[in-house]
Amino acid sequence: MKNIQAHVEALVEKHRIPAMSMAIWQNDQLYQAAAGVLNTDTGVQATTDSVFQIGSISKVFTASLVMQLVDEGKVNLDQPVKTYLPGFNIACPEATQSITVRQLLCHTSGMAGAFAPKDSADQGNPIAHYMDRCYLLPQAYPPGERFSYANSAYCIAGRLVEVMSGLSWCEAIEERIIKPLGMKKVAVSPLEIPRFRAAIGHVRNLQDENQWVPVSDCYLPLSMAPAGSVLAMTAAELIRFAQAHARDGQTQSGVQWLSKNSIQAMQTSQVKLPSYSEQFTTDWGLGWFLLNGAETPVFGHDGVTIGQNALLRVVPEKNLIFSILVNGGDWLGATFLRDVYCDLMRDIADIDYQDPKTIPMPKNAERYCGHYESFGWQWDIEFEQQQLLANITIKALATPSETLVLKPIDTNSFVGYSKEGERQLNITFLSPDKNGCPDYLFSCYELCSRV
């Protein structure tokens, strides 16, 4: 801990990233450090006061707002969303009537998740406009049947917050979270960014992979704010937010900000994830994901925006919270953060996460081959020269497809490696038929159907 600044500087140099900010809270003591540059064009240095986008960690903020409304008796988690949002409509009439608030928060609504429509100048309230455009959003699975990560569900949850609180989502974040928790260095919208020393996202130069260049688009659509497109803060402020969740909902001054029942519900498993899910995640709560594989419970969330990555973990039994913010990442995310996280867990929390060992390729590997698709992802699995290959396309991004080599870790689970041999992500094939051919592919928390 005494050498955290040197540690962060070494990580920035080792992984050749623009900048990193790290904060660790252990035994009521805060340690923080930052290194690198916030913008490779300007050369402005990163400091611990620098704000980075936190991406999908914002979903925990949105879930916290919903749970406050539950505490106030304004929302029931098991009531249909339509109860509170009469204007909520997706393509499936039956699902429109039955999707519950709980299903939004734990990603079991079944609605297509990767809906990211562009903002328009005349849209008025962007989150309300987002919901108005969901009427053609397909229903991928019956509500409550399967887990599949859904940004769309959290945008709807953000609109629910607006309607039931009488505040805009940004105002609700400010009045119900930022001020009560005493958070200072937080930008709740892009309009506030000029007040801070802010990081800009970076992607690798396609002509030189050792060079990072600032992104041309600084933000995902603003209408996706509740899912993670706008919130930016320092690593220490992110820890301050997590502290309230680790203290059973109490602020630093002892005020009950969120009820203990709501805190426990958010940290309790709502759905079990497939084996070998990313980041050793085993379950999903309300907002938080859970890592229950070790003896010591851990909860947290990750975030990815355009060229920025964030990680937050809470280990209550160890009185430990840490956050890492980075302003460089490709479309698969900053995979090195996983290694940084595992090192921290081993060295500070005495929790040793180990990757499962690979095994020989199962017989009849051709049964995995085929085209798998969701609203946001497309996978083509092929078997060539005794290798299983995955060609991956993210539909919303104008980036080249990526091909990974899949190595088995059990009969239906694989780890994907880049052409350079870098570990990228895990893949699990689900629901095999009588011939062993799977109906689904699960990776990056999203479920894709075999077409």
Image (cartoon, rainbow, N blue to C red):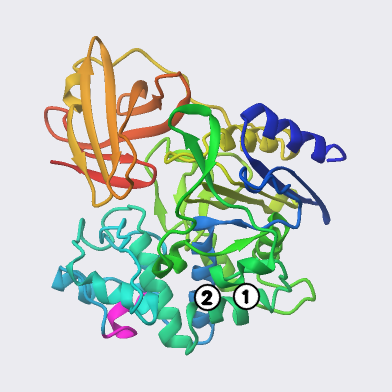
Q: Is residue 370 above or below residue 123?
A: above
Residue 154 quadrant: bottom left
Q: Quadrant of the N terminus?
A: top right
Q: Is residue 282 above or below residue 383?
A: below
Looking at the image, which residue sits at the far right? 2
Residue tagged by mark 1?
177
Q: Is residue 426 above or below residue 39?
A: above
Percent of width and height locating residue 45: 73, 47
Asked if the residues shown at circle 2 and circle 1 are in contact, with their CB atoms under 8 angstroms apart, the answer is yes
Residue at screen point 34% across, 21% down: 405
Callout 1: SS: helix
Q: Quadrant of the C terminus?
A: top left
**Would you call the spot at circle 1 few (<14 residues within 10 Å), some (14-19), or many (20 or more)?**
some
Callout 2: SS: helix
Percent of width and height locating residue 167: 50, 86
Residue at screen point 49% across, 27% down: 208
